[in-house]
Image (cartoon, helix red, strand yellow):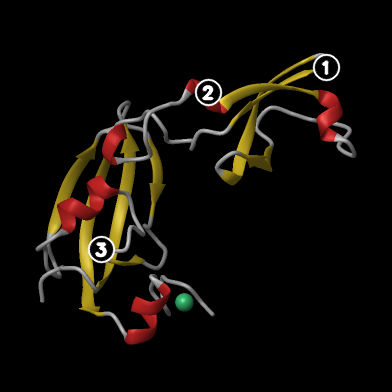
Amino acid sequence: MQIADKSVVSIHYTLTNAEGNVLDSSNGQEPLAYLHGASNIIPGLENALLGKAVGDSLQVTVEPDEGYGPMREELVQDVDRSAFAGIDDVQVGMQFMAQTPWGEQPVTVVKVEGENITLDGNHPLAGQTLSFDVEVVEVREASEEELEHGHVHGAGGHQH
Ligand code: ZN
C-alpha cells in the first residue's frame, strides 16, 4: 500500500540541522504515526512521503518555507518584568503560553536584562534547514473516526 491522502503512516525518523546535530529522533521509541493529508507534519516531509511504501527509506532536506517557516522578527518582543507577576525568577529558556493576535502561542524567554525581558514566539525550528532520515514502518487506511478527528489514534498517535 502506497502512502496517499487518508493513509495512517508510521515512520522512524532522525532529524538533524544544517550543522549535522541531531535535534530529534524516534530511535528507541514508538514510531511517529501521522494522518497523511491532514497537515499533521510539516509540508516538506509530508510531500516527500507521498507514494512511498513500508520498508522505504528516504533522506529529505526541508527548507524553512516547507518546514517551520522563516524566522519572523515581529514575533520577538520586549516586555516589562511586571508582565510576569507571580514568577520571581524569570530565566532564559523558560517557556510560557502568551495571548497574541494569532491566538495562544508558546513563547520562549531569550534575554533577561534588568526589568526588560525579551520573548521569542517563533517555533524553535523556524528559519532552519532540516534534514530527515526517514523509514516507513507501517501504512494503513485511516478509520472514519481518525478522519473526523484529523489525527491518528492508538500507538504513536493520540490516546483518547
Ligand atoms: Zn481523536
Amino acid of disc 1 = Glu
Residue 94: x and y in percent read 69, 36
Q: Viewer-nearest of labels 1 and 3? A: 3
Q: Quadrant of residue 31?
A: bottom left
Tell me if residue 108 comes above or below residue 80 in the rendering.
below
Amino acid of disc 3 = Gly
The label on residue 58 is: none
Q: Viewer-nearest of labels 1 and 2? A: 2
Q: Quadrant of residue 132?
A: top left
Q: Crowding near pointer 1: few (<14 within 10 Å), some, many (20+)?
A: few
Disc 1 under 8 Å from ligand 1? The reply is no
Label 1, on which residue? 115
The label on residue 37 is: 3
Residue 80: x and y in percent read 80, 22
What residue occupies the far top of the structure in this picture?
114
Residue at (40, 68) in percent of width and height:
30
Amino acid of disc 2 = Glu
Disc 3 under 8 Å from ligand 1? The reply is no
> Which of marks 2 and 3 precedes in the sequence?
3
What residue occupies the far front of the structure in this picture?
101
Query: Is 104 on the left or on the right of 87, as rendered?
Result: left
Q: Quadrant of residue 160?
A: bottom right
Residue at (59, 39) in percent of width and height:
101
